[in-house]
Image (spheres, rainbow, N blue to C red):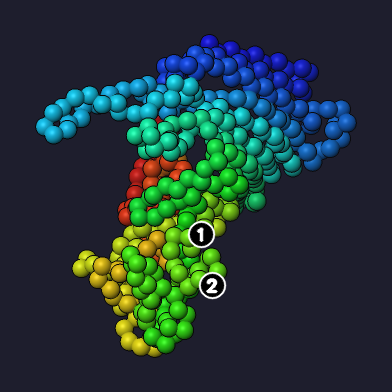
Amino acid sequence: IYGTADYILQNKYIFNLTLANDATSRSGENAPATFVYPSVAAAWLVSGERFMKNTDWLSLLKVRASYGLSGNDEIGTYSARRYYVSQGLLGNFGMAQGNLANTRLRPETIKRLNAGFDLSVLNERINLCVDIYSNTVKDMILRTTPDRRTGFTTYLSNTGSMRNTGIDINMNARVLNGPFKWDLGIMASKYKNEVLKLAGETLYTEVLDGVVQTKVGQPMGVFYGYETDGVYASTTEAQAAGQYEMHGLVQVPFGAGDVRFVNQTGNDKLIDENDQTIIGDPNPTLYGSIVNVFGYKKWSLNALMTYSLGNDVYNYTRSKLENLSTYNNQSVAVLARWKNEGNETSMPAVAYGDPMGNARFSDRWIEDGSYLRLKTLTLAYDLTFRNDVIQGCTLFATGENLFTLTKYKGTDPEFAYGQNPLFYGVDACVLAQPKTISIGLRLSL
């Protein structure tokens, strides 16, 4: 059941109320059958007030705010139901329980709080839209670890919560308005993700030979591995450091040509899983787009640029092409590897099987994924060819992904490895977006 109501008072005060009563068959049998999601929004047209009457430079000023609840039942069709699977033992087949059902499993609830304003000045020559938001996910669905006695390794439960806060800014302006016209649009967004609750657990998720950590008080899915500090140039240098690994009950020291891993636990000289730490954050500091539209007589040029700043990327592709531990082909970068005593390099020596773990998940494979890309560029010419049938005719040429400014060593800094937020920033041998150029004719009939 869904209902909405709108009320406008004196063309200046705007109110909206929405109420949804939803039901889902995916919930557990002991969870509520229906869920109520209300939301309310209000706006004030400040520029319509009498005290703004003499502000000729101001075209529009609207202040708005909203608060509401919504649900997410994308938990799998039978996740909250007990089911059975076929299983064999010593040549005999039967039915075994396939999952550890949570009869109280329910959809997640998202609380959304938003505030912002719309501003237009100089006869709408400059337009600004600003939104500040805080979204909190309650009853977040997590795969937790149940008691070993259950015989299962995972259990779905509503034991988490998370908050996303951020700001979105959109600005559009007519920079030049003479025979030569120039419209500029800038969009900038910044957000912060923070895990609020995890039922006392720190979650570690394996992603393509790497690990992401989810922990209370930090963003979801940060890269978690070993910090490095170059390569041992000589045997003397390695012996002076004295670091070692345990291979069973045997202490095996790092030698010349091995990666120097940072000991996070003190001066014990042992490098093990306790020395892992946060080595990267896939969340950008700032991202958005820039649009420039130029016009002169019958010509127009439209350029769209996208950008992202401050996000880290796990270059899984490079970790396979520079591991120096198999017979597989490697990239030309390994030509700079350590070869002889005294070599100063950041690339370790060849070691088949990687006995000292030089290719383990570390900041060697974490890179700055910042970029600026010319996403589309369109040049058009209006032929002004019109008759009773054809109302308009435009000849155009469009280029996509023409150039990208980035320090990222992968094929493309703009990629997506699935929709799971734990996979953000993972470049899993993703094909680069192609550069394309097309020419066409647009007719309006």
Q: x%, y% of residue 426? A: 41, 52
Residue 203 percent location from the top left of the image: 48, 45
Q: Residues within 10 Å of mark 2 (few under 14, many from 20)?
A: few
Q: Can you give x and y, in whole percent of width and height, for residue 29 in the image?
A: 44, 16
Relative to 291, 317 lies left or right: left
Residue 372 in view, yes or no: no
Residue 28 versus residue 378: which sits nearer the camera? 28
Tell how many labels. Answer: 2
Can residue 197 be seen in the rendering of this structure? Answer: yes
Q: Given the image, on which type of amino acid does mark 2 rest? A: Asn
- 342 vs 86, left or right, is right
Residue to which mark 1 is pinned: 277
| Numbered badge on residue 16 | none
Quick one: quadrant of the C terminus? Answer: top left
Position of residue 355 relative to residue 6, above or below, is below
Judge the density around disc 1: few (<14), some (14-19), many (≥20) Cα neighbours within 10 Å.
some
Q: CA distance from mark 2 to mark 1?
A: 16 Å
- Picture residue at 55% right of the left edge, 69% below the top: 266
Q: Is residue 342 above or below residue 156?
A: below
State the SS at label 1.
Answer: strand
Establish if 392 lies above or below 102.
below
Asked which quadrant contains residue 248, the reply is bottom left
What amino acid is at disc 1? Thr
User: Between disc 2 and disc 1, whose residue precedes?
Assistant: 2
Label 2 residue SS: loop
Q: Residue 267: which disc?
A: 2
